[in-house]
Amino acid sequence: MSEKKLNIALVNDTYYPNVDGVVKTVDSYARVLGKTNNVTVCVPSQGKTVDRFSYRVIRVTSLPVLRTVFRLTLPRCSSELRKYLRNDDIDIVHLHSPFALGRYAMRAAKRRGIPTVATFHSKFYDDFINYTHSRLIARCEVRRIVRFFERADEVWAVSNGTAQTLRSYGYTGPIHLTENGTDFSYPENAEELKKRAIEHFRIPNDKPIILFVGQQIWHKNLRLIIDSCALLKQRGVPYRAIIVGMGYDAEAIKRHARESGLGEEDMLFTGIIRDRELLAGLELSASLFYFPSMYDNAPLVVREASAMHLPSVLLRGSNAAEPTRDGENAIHVPDEASAAADIIEKYLSEPDRLREIGLRASRTIGRRWDEIIPTVYSDYLRINAEHTAQQSN
């Protein structure tokens, strides 16, 4: 990435300290691109957050949205954002969200003739249904999202399944596939990290660990995890489940675990783990990464687990399972607790096979961000050149 230094704006409607796959993606873009380009990340304010990033961050005035980790941005109230989008040299605006801040940045870019890229990450219809319980409202909001993507100079998706989801919403234009990556790699001090995690969480040596990392929301399919783990306990299968993350359904999820007969010795809820080495230690200590979400498209957590040689248990037919093969580099289960428990019990009894699947996962699932971002940079150059050529005609 040494041909030309680009001035890049990355825009998203949520950011640290909230953590999800899109936040991690934007941060990874900014960190790697920022080594040789000028990157500015435009995201919502979040209380008195102090940003210590290697790239510029513009925090935009925002309000909390009830029952979600998301923020309602008020971009017109942010003088720093307005000045930046009106006056600064910007070569490309990359939009990672189709909501208030993304729409504002899209309009600003169009007024100045700056090319735009919009990446489709999430199953927004599912989000709207979960939040509003109204199919009418969900359909109306999805139509607005489609119009947003239709305005972009180029639309990207992170997987074939994600692209199909956008098409199912009614988008008919071209879609460019740009996969997500990971900056996790198998550490040289793996045993040291494992020891620290085992001591920190008091993990018993005689029980395999079943790990989940993600938002504590029902449409991540935490119910299947709890119900299948409860069946494993009833069968006398030794294990300990560790659930990492927070979310607006966290209390209801914990309550369901208790009502299913799972105590802390069976299922430990840790909350968010911001210490990357401690999280890596957990992944290195675990036997299975249980992520049966039908909602997620190309989850970074699966790539991060594979980098730690940790095999993932994924829902059969899900977008998350798209780049994997059952029994080779992942384990696929149906969305039914008894059948899922049967498969997990079988694999827990075969630790050598689990290690083989984990090793194959590390070689076949996902690439590092520093391998992906040079292609992103080349695509930015191409889009910028095409846009310039169109404007000169």
Image (spheres, rainbow, N blue to C red):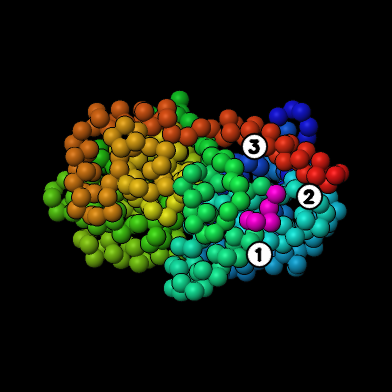
Q: In this view, which residue lies farthest toward the top?
A: 188
User: Which is more toward the observer, 335 or 47?
Assistant: 335
- Please give the count of numbered marks on the rendered protein: 3
User: Which is more toward the observer, 279 or 356?
Assistant: 356
Instruction: Give how far apart the Cα atoms at labels 1 and 2 are.
Output: 19 Å
Residue 353, image x and y in percent? 25, 30
Instruction: Give how far apart the Cα atoms at labels 2 and 3 are.
Output: 17 Å
**Mark 2 or 3 closer to N-term?**
2
Q: Quadrant of residue 337?
A: bottom left
Residue 150 belongs to magenta span: yes
Instruction: Give how far apart the Cα atoms at labels 3 and 1 are.
Output: 25 Å
Residue 247, image x and y in percent? 45, 61
Residue 84 - label: none
- Amino acid at pointer 2: Ile
**Secondary structure beneath label 2:** loop
Residue 275, image x and y in percent? 49, 44
**Secondary structure beneath label 3:** helix
Residue 100 - label: 1
